Amino acid sequence: MKLFIAGGTGFVGNLLTEELRNRGHELVLLSHNRRSTTETGVSYVSGDVAAPAGYAAALQGCDAAINLVGSIREFPSQGITLERLHVEATAGMVQAAQQAGVVRYLQMSALGTRADAVSGYHRTKWRGEEIVRGSSLAWTIFRPSLIFGPKDAFVNMLAANLRLAPIMPTFGHGNYRLQPIHGRDVARCFADALERPETTGQTYELCGLDRLTYRELLDAIAEAIGKARPFKPALPLVIMQPVIKALQGFSAFPITSDQLQMLVEENICNGCWQETFGFTPIRFQQGIREYLSR
C-alpha cells in the first residue's frame, strides 16, 4: 500500500515507519522541514499539517492516510497550540484525504479523551475524533495510554533526574495509576489495522499489561538504571497547582496545569484491544531495561 503519514518523523512515527517499511509499504512522510532520503520506498513532502493546501497533492494515489500529529503542551509563540494541532490539522487532513480519494484513515488520539474532559488536551483530541467520525473515510481511532520506548520524553526525563539524585517528589499522594504501552506495540496496532478490515469504524484504547501507581513507576525506572528506590516526598496539590499555573508559561518549566490534571486522574484501560490484534504487549520493566540500561 502507498501510505501518507503526518507526524511520521516523531517518536512514535519513527517506530511506525520502521514497522510499515518492514511490511513492504510505500511511505510518503509529511515533514515540517524539507528533507531528502536514500531510503527505498520512502519520500518526504514539506509542509504544515495545519495548512493542507501545501501537501494535498501528495495524498493523490495514496491508499491510506495516518495522522500521528499531536502535542502534550502548547507553545503559542511557535504556533503550537492544542486547537491548531488536534482540531484544525485533523480537519484539514481529513478534508484533503477525502478530496484525494483516499479510502482508509488512521487517527492517533489519547486515552482519557472525552467531550467533558477537564484537560484541554483531551477535549481537543475529542473534537479531532469527532471530525474523523463525521467523515466519509474508513477510519480507525487509537487511544494509547502513556507511550514509552527509546527516545520517549516522559520516562527518559524521569530516568535522567533519578540518575542525578535519589529523590523524586510526587504531586499529591502519587498513587494514581498509569498503564504504559510500548511504542512498538502502538506501531504494530496501526500497521495491523491496515490489514484488518474489521477494525474500520472502531476506536481502540491501548494499554500495556502493567498497571502501576506513579510511585511504582518511579521505582521501576530506578531499578532499570541500577539505582535504589528514590525518596518520594508528596507535594500537596493545593500548593503545587497555583505554583504550576504561575510558572507554566516558561518553556523550561517541566509541567503545565493541563499535564498535572491528566497525571492525577489516572490513565488505565481494560486491554480489550488484544482480542482484536492478538499479541501480548511488552512488559514495562522489560521494555525500559532495553533502552535505559544502555
Image (cartoon, helix red, strand yellow):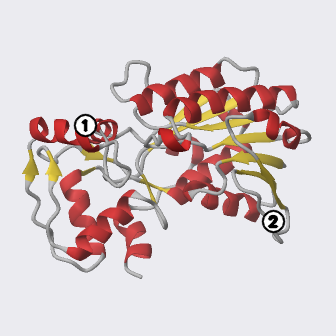
Say above or below: 103 vs 31. Answer: above
Q: Position of residue 127 (x, y in %)?
A: 54, 22
**Which of the two residues, 251 or 141, is positioned nearer the viewer here?**
251
- The residue positioned 33% from the left and 36% from the top of the image is 258
- The residue positioned 58% from the left and 20% from the top of the image is 130
Q: Name which quarter of the figure residue 289 lies in.
A: bottom left
Q: Position of residue 30 (x, y in %)?
A: 74, 49
* Marks 1/2: CA–CA distance: 41 Å
Q: Name which quarter of the figure residue 60 lies in.
A: top right
Callout 1: SS: helix
Quadrant in which the C terminus is drawn: bottom left
User: In this orientation, does residue 293 appear?
Assistant: yes
Please, what is the three-letter code of the amino acid marked with disc 2? Ser
Residue of label 1: 245
Please, what is the three-letter code of the amino acid marked with disc 1? Lys
CB under 8 Å between discs 1 and 2: no
**Which of the two residues, 239 or 277, is positioned nearer the viewer here?**
239
Disc number at residue 113? none
Residue of label 2: 36
Q: Position of residue 149 (x, y in %)?
A: 47, 63
State the residue lying farthest toward the front.
Answer: 77
Q: Name which quarter of the figure residue 49 lies in.
A: top right
Q: Is residue 250 left or right of residue 6?
A: left
- The residue positioned 52% from the left and 57% from the top of the image is 183
Say above or below: 228 vs 101. Answer: below
Q: Residues within 10 Å of mark 1 (few under 14, many from 20)?
A: few
Q: Residues within 10 Å of mark 2 (few under 14, many from 20)?
A: few
Callout 2: SS: loop
